[in-house]
Image: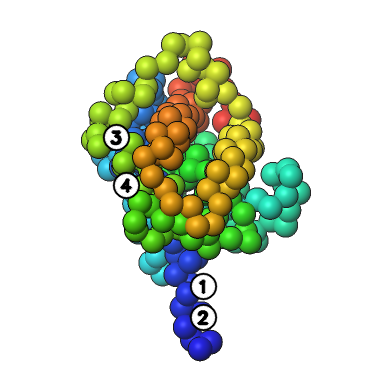
Amino acid sequence: MKKYALIFIVLLSAAQAFGWSQKGHDVVAHIAETHLSKAAADSVARILNGKSPVYWANWLDNASHTSKYAYTKTWHYKNIDAATLNKGKANDKGDAVSAIREQISILSSPASTKEQKELALKILIHIVGDLHQPMHMGHLKDLGGNKIAVKFFDRKTNLHSIWDGSIMNSGHSWSYTEWADQIDRLSDEVEAKESAGNVDDWALQTYDIAKRVYNYFPKGTKVSYNHVATWTPVIEQQLLRGGLRLARILNAIYDPESSDDPSGF
């Protein structure tokens, strides 16, 4: 019996490490790429050996389950049970907020090697996306919604899973480029407002959405068309924020004319 209980816990921990569906991460990476300055785009291409950020957008979800990169498993999320972001006990293995700052530091440092920067950039592309998935700023007691059973139409699942992809993919059957094209249409003024702030601000904003999600989807909820219609605009907003904010970070690091200081994130 203990053996099966242990397997269940491991599976829940593994499930919690996945953020947006593959398409969601591709959307975030693609939006970021289109908002890079020329200088930043050239630097990113050089570090990624000519490949697009989209190419690496989902890499970490698989890599975290290999022995070489197992140390990144907890970096996909930050469980928040307290009223404020830093009030609770920190995860000594790291979390999404600390991991993003660590990658920014590596990418910003002249002492970092090409290999270190390449790894840091691959990780950053993914985790900035994860930071904007509400259940990745969810509660420790339910593993970010993994322990809250719901039905998606007639399929048994959990709250975390439906936020990873079920709602998004039911809201629009677009390709990742179509998603980006349809949601990335803000004025310059609104775009600047949405990308403002630092990593703590963004995590708290996502946590505020998570609290609304918990209230809206109690255990046993049967998710249907009205739920999808209600929450798809929130997903659109979060994917766009993730892309714009990732672009702002990379522009701050790689564009000398950027007004941002990378250490300010």
Classify 10 Å Cα crowding around label 4: few (below 14), some (14-19), many (20 and above).
some
Chain-order first, disc 3 or disc 2:
2
**x, y percent for residue 41:** 35, 27
Identify which residue is drawn at 54% across, 57% down. Answer: 219
Is tag 4's residue or tag 1's residue first in the polypeptide sequence? Answer: 1
Question: Which of the two discs, 4 and 2, labels the residue nearer the N terminus?
Answer: 2
Within 10 Å of disc 3 (Cα), the crowding (few <14, some 14-19, many 20+) is few
Which residue is labeled 1 in the image? Answer: 9
Tell me the residue that label 4 is attached to.
Answer: 22
Observer-side mark, 1 or 3, equals 3
Q: Which residue is drawn at 52% across and 22% down?
A: 194
Mark 4–mark 1 Cα distance, whole angstroms, equals 24 Å
Q: What element carries label 2?
A: helix
Describe the element under mark 1 as helix, strand or loop: helix
List x then y, in percent, for residue 46: 32, 35
Secondary structure of residue under mark 3: loop
Give the numbered dot on residue 5. 2
**Occupied quadrant, residue 140:** bottom right
Direction from residue 211 to residue 243 in the image, left or right: left
Mark 4 or 2, closer to the camera: 2
